[in-house]
Image (tube, rainbow, N blue to C red):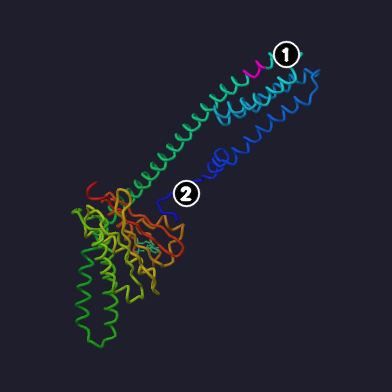
Amino acid sequence: MAWNNDRVRENKPEIAESFFADSPRFRLFVSLIIAVSIVLVTILHFLTPLDQIVWHEIYQRLYYIPIIAAALLFGLRGGLMASVFTTLVYAPHIFLHWQHGHFDYSINQYAEIVIFNLVGGIMGTLGDRLKQARTRAERNAAERQKAYDELQKTFEQLLQAEKLSSLGELSAGIVHEVRNPLGSIKGAVEILEDELKPDSPRREFAHLAKKEIERLDKLVGEFLRFARPSQLSVVPIDLNETVESVAALVENQAAAQNVFIEKEFTEGLPAVLADAEQIKQVLLNLSINSLQAMPRGGKVTFRTFQTGENCAVEIEDEGGGIDEELLPKIFDPFFTTKEKGVGLGLSIAHKIAAQHKGSLIAASHEQNAIFRLELPHAALS
Ligand code: ADP
């Protein structure tokens, strides 16, 4: 399940590389090849007549290939194991075939065995160093990626904040111009309505005009809240109690829509330092969105739990989820897919969460939409 602020990373090559490099099966396979190569070279020695000294010299050098391979792949331990194994299989051949009659030559071969072990040791040390350097480089790359991801996240937050603040200024201007005349229009329509007879068909028009004015008033109110968010008045609050009170507020509407409310509260959560009214507003917005997503019934789950340094509330509904391509946009001001939506609920909620040094994220899993509000513990704020 992808949360809306997750970045999708292309990490297949990393997985493939670590599978080959670190898989025990791969290590066993390569170890077997190395051991078989050493045995094969020894068999060649045993089968080659003693008068073909040139071939013996060549085979003797062939031992370096598996020893160096083992050292580079498995480090000091691998290099020494390969050279000791070579010593064990090659020494009997020297002893049995060359010791008697070709004493000088056998001394040369014993010396070569010493060199095998030296090469195994030196190359093995080099292999270990290479491995350490690679691990360091991988760790640095991972740290760089993490820093980049954090930078990207901050950048997106800044972008969101900038969008919000410029829209806020714009909204403040509009609100100023619209609010007062709206009040006068409403009053005028009410006076006109009063003058109409109760059975006049024109009453319906007056009613329609009043409803539209109320809608505009609500819209203007939302703008106002967006443009000039009220000051936070923070106190330690019990998140379970806050969620409980919001669930109570939507209970009737939920019952009318055949929506079952489930509560999965974690007991003993630490208090969070927050403005209870604003947090209720956030949760109410999320709950109303959930109910709107389930006009034909379903289940909404309120969940509270602890996540590291934060306390979290999750609201999950079964309203069909949120399309993957819409997820990154739903917190944008004025983004809405509803016919009569304003598209400010989530962006205001997001802003409130940020003001509390918390976060609000969304995810979609199969037919479920999940919103998670996280707030820092009061003790840490
Ligand atoms: P509005 O409710 O006015 O559209 P919001 O900012 O509250 O504004 O929501 C923005 C959009 O996010 C909605 O129009 C909808 O597309 C999507 N959305 C929000 N909550 C849900 C949900 N629970 N399930 C599906 N979509 C949702």
Please state the extent of the stretch shown in magenta in the rendering. 110-114
Residue 112: say if magenta. Answer: yes
Residue placed at 51% from the left, 45% from the top? 10
Q: Position of residue 251 (x, y in %)?
A: 29, 72
Q: Nearer the viewer, residue 314 or 278?
A: 314
Which residue is labeled 1 in the image?
Answer: 105
SS category of the residue bearing label 1: helix
Helix, strand or loop status at disc 2: loop
User: From what the image shows, is residue 141 above or below residue 358?
Assistant: above
Residue 272: % across, % down: 24, 53
Q: Residue at x 37, y 44 (%)?
A: 155
**In this view, which residue lies farthest toward the top?**
104
317 in magenta: no
Q: Look at discs 2 and 1 and give the one toward the viewer.
A: 1
Three-letter amino acid code at the position of disc 2:
Val
- In primary-sequence order, the first of circles 2 and 1 is 2
Q: Residues within 10 Å of mark 1 (few under 14, many from 20)?
A: some
Tell me the quarter of the picture where residue 242 sits.
bottom left
In percent of width and height, residue 144 lies at 43, 37
Q: Which residue is mark 2?
A: 8
67 on left or right of 55:
left
Residue 299: quadrant of the picture: bottom left
- 297 left or right of 205 in image: right
